[in-house]
Image (tube, rainbow, N blue to C red):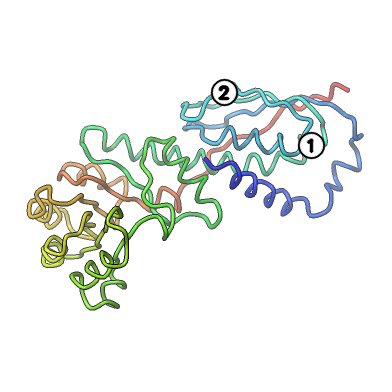
Amino acid sequence: MNYLIIDKIIKEALIEDIPNEDISTNSIIEKESISTIELLSKEEGIIAGLEVFKRVFDILGGVEVNLYKTDGDRIYPKDKIAFLKGNTRNILLGERVALNLLQRMSGVATLTNTFVKELENSNTKLLDTRKTTPNLRVLEKYAVKVGGGCNHRFNLSDGIMLKDNHISASGGIKEAVKLAKENNSFVRKIEVETENLEMVKEALEAGADIIMLDNMDLETAKEAIAIINGSAITEFSGNVGLHNIKAIGEIGVDYVSVGALTHSYKVLDLSMKNLKKIS
């Protein structure tokens, strides 16, 4: 993870939550007060984002965070994940931001791991998409990796993907690929979105490096893979869920992309409890 970006995310989240001061805490807690508190799990899942959680309190200062778990660990209800000791005000200031980020990242990792398990008897790899929470992409894509998935491109500058609107705007697949090759370095791979077998054949003839099989039924996708026959990397996309991802893996596609990993996850239920004021 890029910690310059991480720090920016955390600081902006803290400003959102504390535009001036925490009037509840500052009304009743002395500046020099020291306390301890535990980070606990309330449900089973994959933990992800512990260093981000810790970084919130590093930025606020005066709080030591001891981690009992590592990103990627499976946790269970009542597990102790971390122990914090330090300035009571800063513990309370950072609590919500730290939990919000950790819970969301752990939710992504947990859902990703559930999908990965469905593919474990195939050679198909799981991909995320750009359907991420605005400004939290780096965190969510990191969480996908923690859950066992792979990252697709991070942004529009990261790779060439010619989708349906690009193809329409340029006059067809062959022309779109031709222009992409002419206007980019040869080291950049070109992915083309296809919706039927004719488009697959056209993408192959144009020299696409990666061919996306978008919203195809399994029989059509299987036929497309046979036509491609290893001449390009294949990616299955569209309407993928836990109900069908195992079957998708069985047709021999190289990758399957799932937007739900970062747009339909459930946050993992964690809490900071048992605060004890020691001075």
Percent position (x, y) of residue 194? 21, 63
Q: Kindly identify which numbered label has been placed on residue 79.
A: 2
Q: Is mark 2 on a helix, strand or loop?
A: loop
Q: Is mark 1 on a helix, strand or loop?
A: helix
Q: Kindly identify which numbered label has been placed on residue 90.
A: 1
Asked if residue 40 is positioned above or below residue 203 in the image, the reply reads above
Figure disc tally: 2
Asked if residue 180 is positioned above or below residue 238 in the image, the reply reads below
Identify the residue at image location x=41%, y=47%.
261
Type of residue at label 1? Asn
Identify the residue at image location x=44%, y=57%.
155
Query: Could you tell me how far apart the alpha carbons at marks 1 and 2 are, in whole angstroms?
Result: 24 Å
Give the side of residue 52 with respect to residue 183, left or right. Answer: right
Foreground disc of the pair 1, 2? 1
Q: Which of marks 1 and 2 is nearer the N terminus?
A: 2
Quadrant of the frame with the C terminus? top right
Percent position (x, y) of residue 78? 58, 24
Identify the residue at image location x=76%, y=27%.
275
Q: Is the residue marked by circle 2 packed among few (<14), some (14-19), or many (20+) residues within 10 Å?
A: some
Asked if residue 77 is positioned above or below residue 197 in the image, the reply reads above
Please state which of residues 57 and 242 is positioned toward the viewer in this rendering. 57
Please state which of residues 77 and 94 is positioned toward the viewer in this rendering. 94
Type of residue at label 2? Asp
Give the side of residue 29 with respect to residue 241, left or right. Answer: right
